[in-house]
Amino acid sequence: MRLYAKVESTKTITKARLHTISTLTSLSLQCNTNVTVTADGGQLSNDAGLVLFQEFLHRINFRQLANQCLKLPDQRRFWKASMIDIFLEKLLLDVAGYLHDSSVNDWQRDPVLAATLGSSRLVSQPSLSRFFKRLEDADLDDFRKLIWQVAALAFRLSGQSRFVLDIDSTHCDTFGNQERSAFNAHYMAYGYHPQVVFDQESGLLLDTLMRPGNEYTGKDSSRQLFRAYRRSLKAPASSFEAIRGLLRQNFTRCATHMASTFWFDSRQIQSLGSWQKRP
């Protein structure tokens, strides 16, 4: 389903038009006070739904969180869009479901995105390619910090105090000569084998670790769980769970020294060893 919206400057809206807008489903943006979105059937953009996502990012101060967490390298002398601007455009591109970065070239001619984001913040595909080329290993750790800060904000707003850690690995296909790409016999494909940690209660992503495609599923799972656990100590956690066979013996040994109550999935009994006799 395609979403269409009409975007117009509030400076040009007459009193009669304001009365009409009040009777329609409309939205005055906080991220850009000069823009009002109305769903009156105008066909200005195929990506008008992204306006709502932009507004959501603005209301949670996502740009401020990104500036605090990300220290992206930038040696450019002349530029219009900052590194954070490029990152946010890539985020919007993924949310919209575009598979190729070349789609941003069309966005430069999109009136809705130009009005809400600002035409100077819309970059071309080569700018995205150079953005990724500048990233280093330390920058990936900064992105992990940003992931946690967004999740922590959601926990504070919801008052959540119970966390169920759902850790698993997944596969990302790669094409061409990608760095550290390897063949994974389970998926019968070349790519990466990242490890992800979700909170099953809220469905929020807590952490992720990029790994080569031939890394074993459970490698570093204990470190990932402890990382998520330590961060969750700021809230009164009552339950933690690890699923899909990623538990390791060192995790179960260290867990005995923690004050929280741990519940383990029944599929973990074999990997728990002596723990299966504990209450």
Image: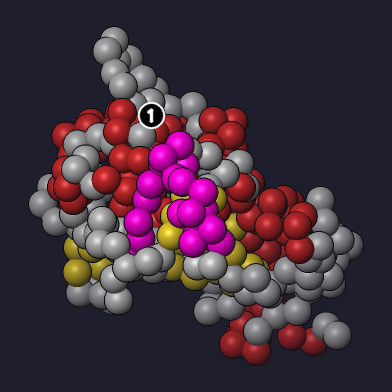
Which residue bears the numbered disc 1?
Answer: 83
Q: State the residue at coordinates (80%, 87%).
A: 277
**One can see residue 197 in this view:** no
Which amino acid does the dot numbered 1 rest on? Met
Q: State the residue at coordinates (43%, 60%).
A: 38
Q: State the residue at coordinates (19%, 69%).
A: 189
Secondary-structure class at tag 1: helix
Furthest toward the left, the residue is 176
In the rendered image, residue 179, in percent from the top left (x then y), is placed at 23, 44
User: Residue 10 versus residue 48: which sits nearer the camera?
Assistant: 10
Furthest toward the top, the residue is 77
User: Residue 181 versus residue 97: which sits nearer the camera?
Assistant: 97
Q: State the residue at coordinates (41%, 65%).
A: 39
Query: For residue 18: magenta?
Result: yes
User: Residue 178 versus residue 95: which sits nearer the camera?
Assistant: 95
| Location of residue 260 with respect to 101 vertically, above or below | below
In the rendered image, residue 57, in percent from the top left (x then y), is placed at 53, 48
Furthest toward the front, the residue is 16
Query: For residue 11: magenta?
Result: yes
Q: Which quadrant is home to the C terminus?
A: bottom right
The magenta region covers 4-22
Q: Is residue 82 left or right of residue 226?
A: left
**One can see residue 80 in this view:** yes
Q: How many marks?
A: 1
Quarter-of-image position of residue 9? top left
In the rendered image, residue 143, in percent from the top left (x then y), is placed at 49, 42
In the rendered image, residue 159, in percent from the top left (x then y), is placed at 81, 62
Q: Is residue 147 left or right of residue 251?
A: left
